[in-house]
Image: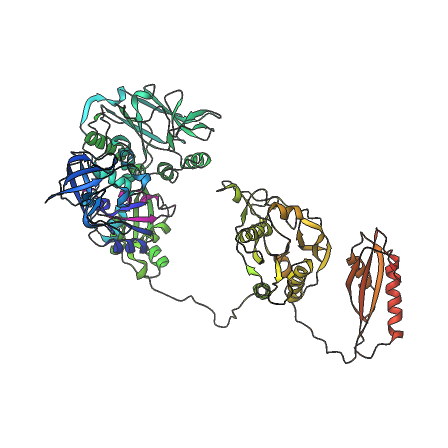
Amino acid sequence: MLVSKEWLSDYVKVDLPVEELAEKITRSGIEIEEIIDYKKDIKNLVVGYVESKEKHPDADKLNVCQVNVGEETLQIVCGAPNVDAGQHVIVCLPGGRLPGGVKIKRAKLRGVESNGMICSLGELGIASNLVPEAYTTGIYVFTGDVKPGQDALEALDLNDEVMELGLTPNRNDCMSMIGTAYETSALYEEDLSLPTSEIKETAEQASDYISIKIDDEQASPYYAARVVKNVKIGPSPEYIQSRLMKAGIRPINNVVDVSNYVMLEFGQPLHMFDYDQIGSKEILVRYANDGEVMTTLDDQERKLLSSDIVITNGEKPVALAGVMGGDFSEVTDNTVNVLIESAMFAPLNIRKTAGRLNLRSESSSRFEKGVAAEFVEDALNRAAYLLQENAQGEVLSGIVAAGTLPELTTNVEITTEDINRLIGFEISNTEIKNIFERLGFDSKVDGDAFNVVVPSRRGDITIKEDLVEEVARIYGYDALPATLPVTKTNKQVGLTDYQAKRRAVKSLLQGLGLNQAITYALVSKEKAQQFALKQADTVKLLMPMSADHAELRQSLIPHLVDVVVYNNARQMKNVAFYEVGNTFFKVEGAELPSEEEHIAGIITGEVTPSYHQGKKEMVDFFHVKGIVEAIAERIGIKFEYRRSEETLLHPGRSADIYVGDEKVGIIGQLHPSFESDNDLNETYIFELDLKMLLNDTQGQILYNMIPKFPGTSRDIALEVDRAMDTGELIKVIEATDNKLLQSAKVFDVYQGEHIADDKKSVAIRLEFLNPEQTLTDEDIKPIYDKVLENLTATGAKLRG
């Protein structure tokens, strides 16, 4: 919400610097995100009167104007197509300044002297989409009563600062100038002055021109209308146009502008119908029929659902309630008679309709949060009054309405003890009652008990805890006492076992050269189950902001791939990232998904750059496997690797990672076709279920003495089927029941000459050690023979 200090001053006295006002409001709980100063960097800006205009002798698109600026008449060369004699315009005098550091000097344009500049609104810093359409390609022309030499910023009501309020969804009361005025009045204990609407009604009855019916009061509890005849369409007064522009709305004409002006004033959206184009004397509010079609003001044909609320002429829709009007009933330059709508609609339906059709507007944003029942008719009367004053409209007698206006107040009971117990110190009954009065809440006091009457504009206050918050913020958060929490001094504080191990793993990866990435938990439907470690349904958002963020991820890899693609596109070809984050798996019958923490990494490019005479080294499977093994060693777990069936990984350079019979991760190269689709070079990934790995508390580490006697090794070369995993051979060797056999490691795999096409040679080194004495061949031979016997039983054949 953009709040003009000049406009706010109409309702409550704020005679202090805008920075102080913004600070006070922020400290009360509503953050001021920005202050826009329209007079900043502007100097020597006055109203000028164009006495004459002549063509420039040497330029077809330039005009030489004689402009009265009060004390003198200046010759100014102007290139605006709409400049003409008899206009009151904005003039920046010589020596003046405009936003952006523009300095205005006396100059010669094509040989003709020019003493100043006739300005457009854009040159004063007004965004082009907010400038009235008549002035988008030229200078601004005053339509009100102004005098030459007058300060142009004051004439435009731009001698002003505007605060941008960062409102939370519950504070929709401050989505209006009057709501903000109530807030300011409470903070400064200043009197509030609300606008008046002295309507001069004609003898004709509005009920003779229109009738209103509501099919379902759940869709629209209350719908009211007024009829204004014989309006004269034209531009709005300068003050209305200026206030709309400062609030971020483009002025259109005096009828449309009134609806927007009153919406900003009261927070109650209105709609102006061209009465003569409605097509009947009946307004029927109902739910749309499934598949019903209407064309909205933006010339788009909309297919409606039964949850949409429509305003109809008894048969066909003339407006999409709370969102946008229909094309044929809009106010145009030919409009003579106007029907003003002021209503209440079901907030949830408005939000669903606006979101589904992507038609979010100032109107829908207010309706979907709920409007105040107390302002529905006040806003309607205010709009009729302004049409009477600014469009010479004749307001017909009476309001035509249907439905029941909801309660204008809510009663909430609270005691002094409730307030002081929750705030933490003593506030007297008198101070509490004063705060309620400052907020505009009536209250009845019975001893220490308060019966507080909360107006409907404060729909966020329904229980006593809400009132406690109001008392605290108006009293001043700075006045609340600072206290330390009570703790037991004998309780040891520190990281949990899980937290310590997670921090150690992150430190390890950073030490190995990986940089931490943080990505979104939301992914597209296509990526939601990519690289998932287990099968489960995904968790979908009901109303995603975009198709790219529609479901909760089941793996960290898809977004890490996006991170590498992003870096590669910016000439960063050698990258290594890791991420620790949550994944989400739907649980049948449970309301919430299973939330599991994973750790993943991705590496591509050179591991060792080729500086000077160094040999460059590209990342490969064993590089990444070394990182995964380092994690396993750090947390005291032994991993087992099995062939992976993941279709997005290279079939010969990937593996599933197991601990016992539990799958805890994956490792491998991205499939070449997946790499090609993402314009990647050889890229390797790993992902581990951190929650599963770290949940077991790590016990005490036991150390053995350094052996006094040397160990020995034997190499064995086996010919096996090419399809056999080498890991199966290691399992067979490790199953040999002998304490002297310490380890078995594959150090070579060969396929090619002297080996059958369906076979491969696997070379394995066996390590032996006896910590009590030196090993001899006689000690090793029976173990070696037993290992060979077990391997032969699997189909392996000793080479050589």
Depicted 497 relative to depicted 654: above or below: below
Depicted 634 relative to depicted 419: above or below: below
Pick the front one: 24 or 576: 576
Q: Which residues are magenta?
A: 155-179
The residue that appears at 71% across and 54% down in the rendered structure is 655
| Residue 442 visible in the displayed image | no
Question: What quarter of the picture does the C terminus occupy?
Answer: bottom right
Please provide percent x and percent y for residue 169.
39, 45
- Determine if the magenta segment contains residue 175: yes
Depicted 379 relative to depicted 94: above or below: above
- Determine if the magenta segment contains residue 494: no
Q: Is residue 781 left or right of residue 337?
A: right
Q: Is residue 79 left or right of residue 313?
A: left
The residue that appears at 27% across and 26% down in the rendered structure is 333
Question: What quarter of the picture does the N terminus occupy?
Answer: top left
Please provide percent x and percent y for residue 434.
24, 52
Q: Residue furthest bottom?
A: 708
Q: Residue furthest left?
A: 71
Q: Is residue 441 left or right of residue 462?
A: left
Pick the front one: 153 or 528: 153
The residue that appears at 79% across and 79% down in the rendered structure is 709
